[in-house]
């Protein structure tokens, strides 16, 4: 309840200065994604999307833009990499090394959620309930710059977000989207206004600091709890232990996996509707913002999966697989894409055409409405694609 209150406060405060960029799925892909394939963008789903958009004959640019709208911030399509995860590795050694290699966003969503409460939490170390494991107060290096109320509201919501996802998926989709929007806006606010107030630089022995569990301060929430005959202090606690304190260097061990499970469970439940599309886009962007805030804007790079790149190349060149051919050919093409992804690589247009030629996979050019027969010489096939 406290997490939801804090998210609503963040939305009410940050809606004036932030912007939610996810509105609706492009109409051209909404129909196909209500079927057996969905937002998660496996190789099979990307191939289905290629086929669907190509045979709608949208034209290469529109087909490509429509596909990109579905995949550019998809947790299974977008990859992040930190050039150096120096600060992250101080308290999350394993996860820090993980993010130094390209990882799809949903693999590092938990890292973003765990780092959130640390990003910009200097205000709490001075004015709020925070301590060292010895019980001693936290000392902050001077000079110390105070946060605005807006940034402090964002920081408060990041800690509640950690508690919310750590408790597991158990609420309705509208509430989950509310939390995702709050997470996105708070990450945006902290990226803009908390980057210079980095806890890693301003607090000595950060790993010995403990974070207090979120405490309700909404009067209605407190009244509901008390009307049930419960004491506030008896119902406040971190989900993993029920205790009031969480040591910073225990963040990843306790909440990395639950956070990833939360995202994957929700996406699986909403793989074919707007909720999954919106949630994936919001959490992917929020994760990137958090990593940037912690490690610096020049330290984060991103890329896309092989299946996303293949879809981009094929639609840009007007290529789909011909409909009337053995089902095994479609699976063979999916396996081809997945092999590149396993090798952290992606095929070029020439490699796609060459593979299809060598395996008798029939292609069709939706720009010229002409088949590209694998029986033709490869050079001729190449020419017909590039010059429809």
Image (tube, rainbow, N blue to C red):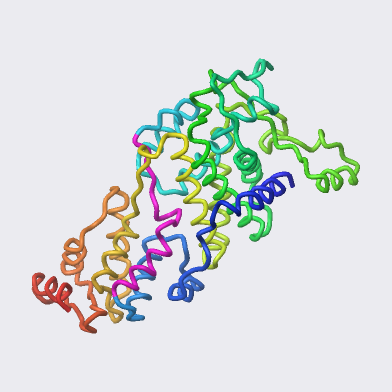
225 or 137, which is in the foreground? 137
Residue displayed at 57% across by 54% down: 265
19 or 302, which is in the foreground? 19
Quadrant hosting residue 292? top left
386 or 381, which is in the foreground? 386
Task: Please identify the quadrant where the C terminus is shown.
Answer: bottom left
Using the image, determine if residue 51 lies above or below residue 244: below
124 or 277, which is in the foreground? 124
- Residue farthest to the bottom, as pictured: 369
Residue displayed at 26% across by 79% down: 366
- Residues drawn in magenta: 60-83
How far from the left and from the top, in percent, is residue 287?
48, 45
Quadrant hosting residue 270? bottom right
How far from the left and from the top, in percent, is residue 78?
39, 52
Q: Is residue 34 left or right of residue 68?
A: right
Quadrant hosting residue 73? bottom left
Residue 29 visible in this rendered orientation of the protein: yes
Residue displayed at 58% across by 36% down: 117
Residue displayed at 47% across by 75% down: 27
Q: Is residue 85 a member of the stretch shown in magenta?
A: no
């Amino acid at each position: 309840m406290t997490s939801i209150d804090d998210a609503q406060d963040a939305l009410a405060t940050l809606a004036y200065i932030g912007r939610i960029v996810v509105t609706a799925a492009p109409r051209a892909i909404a129909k196909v994604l209500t079927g057996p394939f969905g937002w998660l963008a496996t190789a099979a789903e990307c191939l289905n999307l290629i086929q669907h958009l190509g045979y709608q004959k949208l034209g290469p640019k529109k087909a490509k833009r429509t596909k990109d709208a579905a995949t550019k911030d998809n947790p299974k399509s977008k990859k992040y990499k930190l050039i150096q995860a120096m600060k992250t590795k101080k308290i999350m050694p394993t996860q820090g090394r993980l993010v130094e290699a390209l990882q799809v966003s949903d693999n590092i969503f938990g890292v973003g959620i765990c780092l959130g409460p640390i990003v910009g939490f200097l205000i709490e170390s001075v004015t709020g309930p925070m301590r060292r494991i010895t019980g001693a107060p936290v000392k902050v290096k001077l000079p110390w710059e105070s946060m605005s109320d807006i940034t402090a509201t964002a920081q408060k919501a990041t800690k509640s977000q950690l508690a919310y996802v750590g408790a597991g998926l158990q609420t309705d989709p509208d509430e989950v989207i509310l939390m995702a929007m709050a997470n996105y806006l708070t990450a945006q606010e902290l990226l803009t206004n908390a980057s210079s107030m980095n806890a890693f630089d301003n607090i000595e022995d950060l790993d010995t600091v403990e974070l207090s569990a979120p405490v309700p301060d909404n009067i209605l929430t407190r009244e509901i709890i008390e009307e049930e005959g419960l004491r506030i202090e008896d119902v406040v606690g971190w989900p993993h232990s029920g205790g009031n304190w969480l040591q910073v260097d225990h963040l990843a061990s306790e909440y990395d996996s639950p956070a990833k499970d939360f995202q994957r469970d929700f996406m699986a439940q909403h793989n074919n509707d707007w909720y999954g599309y919106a949630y994936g886009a919001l959490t992917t962007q929020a994760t990137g913002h958090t990593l940037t805030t912690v490690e610096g804007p020049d330290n984060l790079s991103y890329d896309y999966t092989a299946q996303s790149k293949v879809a981009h190349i094929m639609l840009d060149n007007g290529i789909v697989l011909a409909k009337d051919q053995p089902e095994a050919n479609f699976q063979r093409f999916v396996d081809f894409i997945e092999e590149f992804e396993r090798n952290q690589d992606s095929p070029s247009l020439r490699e796609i055409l060459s593979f299809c030629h060598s395996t008798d996979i029939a292609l069709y050019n939706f720009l010229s409405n002409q088949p590209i027969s694998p029986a033709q010489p490869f050079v001729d096939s190449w020419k017909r694609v590039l010059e429809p």
